[in-house]
Image (cartoon, rainbow, N blue to C red):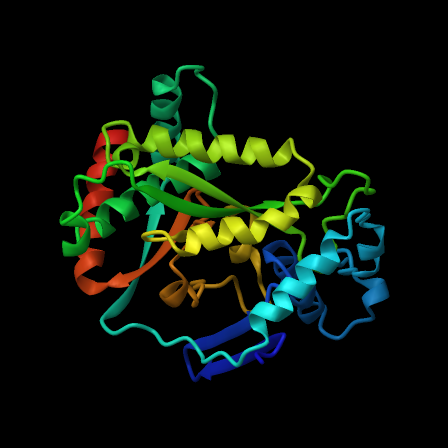
Amino acid sequence: MRPIMAMQVTIFPGAGICIGNSATHVVADGVTFSHFMKYWMSLTKSSGKDPATVLLPSLPIHSCRNMIKDPGEVGAGHLERFWSQNSAKHSSHVTPENMVRATFTLSRKQIDNLKSWVTEQSENQSPVSTFVVTLAFIWVSLIKTLVQDSETKANEEDKDEVFHLMINVDCRNRLKYTQPIPQTYFGNCMAPGIVSVKKHDLLGEKCVLAASDAITARIKDMLSSDLLKTAPRWGQGVRKWVMSHYPTSIAGAPKLGLYDMDFGLGKPCKMEIVHIETGGSIAFSESRDGSNGVEIGIALEKKKMDVFDSILQQGIKKFAT
């Protein structure tokens, strides 16, 4: 069984250090881990001073998990399913051959242009968030890249094939029958949601609009529902996602502020989410230059990465210029 959390610091003499970490989502979600790292950062910068005399972020807390009301005992059933699925010994993930990583950045101007295009094309003219429009644009570009393989070309007539994207919604302050969960809560407080869009819509002229509308609708549906009551169906949705062509998920988020972490040596030069090489995930963070843009990490085979880069640049010219 994998360790709950592991950390490693590698020193590159005369160049800098790399802080590597791994944590299972049984223990923490992205919000929790970001807060934990920022608290550790603040302690490091305090130079050993008494924490009581230093202005620090709020201490991560886990005692408030008793505040979560679960009248339907959803948690017990979910835990039982988790252990049954993870009781077998799993081999470690192996990175596919010819895999390369690349980081792309959408500037604030490009994102604003994307938002304007989607709003103009939308029937209800509703504004769209930075997260939604960026995710929609990158997902469309990725799917267009992946469907160019020989297997999918042989099935081009199947325009009603559905592609699935997994998103996560922060449940803090959104659980019914429960007191507000503080942002400093140490644990996993996320709910998964599956966004489904037909192939012909993701490849059509208004592909970004179709993806954006689907993501927005799924988020609104989740926020308006009793999230704990939907928990028994999470596994069903995840299985549908896993069995589909090119299941895609998200790692990180621009709002986490990962580039603000300064341990006293300066802000990070680069942040990488390693598991995107094996998990089919798109990595998101704020842009490292502080320009309010979004940084996107992708891992693909070299040949497909070249195709993705080309499709992305074409999309920027069409939708974001």
Image quadrant holding the C terminus, namely: top left
**Who is closer to the viewer here, 65 or 273?**
65
Measured from the top left, where is residue 174 in percent x and y?
Answer: 71, 39
- Residue 105 seen in the figure: yes
Measured from the top left, where is residue 170 in percent x and y?
Answer: 63, 46
**Who is closer to the viewer here, 182 or 72?**
72
Residue, x 18% and y 55% (percent of image)?
A: 151
Residue, x 57% and y 79% (percent of image)?
A: 2
Task: Classify 229 as above or below 11.
Answer: above
Quadrant of res 52: bottom right
- Residue 249 seen in the figure: no
Residue, x 52% and y 74% (percent of image)?
A: 19
Image quadrant holding the N terminus, namely: bottom right
Quadrant of res 91: bottom left
Residue, x 14% and y 48% (percent of image)?
A: 153
Q: Left or right: 189 with respect to 200?
A: right
